[in-house]
Image: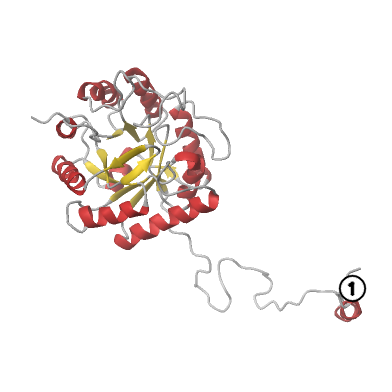
Amino acid sequence: MNSKVNWELVNALVQSDDNVSISRLYGYPELLNPLESVFAPGVELQPKWEIPNEVAICTAITGAMNSRKSNPNQPVTVEQIREEAMECCEAGAANVHIHVRDDNEINAMDLDRFHQVIDPIHEKYPDVLVCGCAVPFVPGEFEKMEQLLKEGLFDQTPVNTVASYLSDTLFCKPPHVMIKKAEICEKYGVKPQIAIYSDGDIDNARRYLINTGVLSKPYYWILLPGLVGCSPMYSSLSMIDTLMGYVRRIREIDAGSQIMVVSGGRASSHITALSLLMGLDVRVGKEDTIWRYPHKDEMIRRNVDVYRETVQMARLLGREPATPSEYVKKFGLKRQGGKRIG
């Protein structure tokens, strides 16, 4: 028996109090009423959380970074990218995010290849929105990017405000590049996504795109922490700390901003779950991670599998995938639908 316990006192009080709990039932006969207090009728005791019922779910099919060396399931040809995108549309996706690759499997600003992927989507699923990644990497691609936006292939496209080493690659967008791209997007009615890789990128967006008046509201942020070289997510705790910090900084800039979080790096499906809990929107798929879970090496096989799992996760948390119309309203999109201008 533990000698530090005053058992004489404990046993005496057990006998004198009949070993019962102390209680006074002011709201008798109810022990606990979660809806109302007898002292304050009509006062809501546990208000509903302010979480949107709908959640925008975007599926990023392939991206520019991951190769078949890291994930043999990575789609790289026009046919593979189109097939996986169409599978997601067939499963009910409201929005797909498209890159195309060249014959060497390198990200390409290739108008014809974009048409080969996106035109069949517009034809078979006219309500589905397309987020196209028009990110110029080499000289001459900026003009190709503007042509892509002019032709109306994309409803949204990222404007990166980044200067980071992504793995062993320096990825930097100088101020004049991000400003000019944002201006062109607004000109052609393609909604700019403010793409953020670290918290410094948030301030870049504030300084160059928001406080300058280049972007129109609602601001549409897409957060990419957790990738190699970006804001670290070494564990569930750093994942939570990092995402909370991002969201707080963005809300300080503009409380009405729309925020989408990608399933980046090792965080994968767990940051998707956290984002759903926080009432945010999500982007999933093989552009942003090769893994299904942060604590396992199991790789993503098909994008449609991840999309379906995300829908199931959202519904288990009481949220419904946004329809294309809800998507348009939420982010202030102007439907393009592949129209050709000029």
Provide residue 107's location: percent of width, then percent of height. 30, 28
- Reply above or below: 80 against 183: above
- Reply above or below: 182 against 297: below
Is 68 positioned to the left or the right of 333 in the image? right
Q: Is residue 257 visible?
A: no
Residue closer to the observer: 39 or 280 = 280
Residue drawn at (39%, 56%) of the image: 247
Mark 1, Cα crowd under 10 Å, few <14 / some 14-19 / many 20+, is: few
Provide residue 158's location: percent of width, then percent of height. 27, 41
Quadrant where the image shows the N terminus = bottom right
Residue closer to the observer: 230 or 308 = 230
The image shows a total of numbered marks equal to 1
Q: Quadrant of residue 211?
A: bottom left
Q: Colour scheme of this structure image? A: secondary structure
- Amino acid residing under circle 1: Ser
Report which residue position mark 1 lands on: 3
Residue closer to the observer: 274 or 238 = 238
- Reply above or below: 25 against 240: below
Provide residue 157's location: percent of width, then percent of height. 26, 39
Q: Is residue 287 visible?
A: yes
Residue drawn at (14%, 32%) of the image: 143
Q: Secondary structure at mark 1?
A: loop
Is 47 positioned to the left or the right of 256 in the image? right
Is 272 positioned to the left or the right of 2 in the image? left
Provide residue 81's location: percent of width, then percent of height. 35, 23
Quadrant where the image shows the C terminus = top left
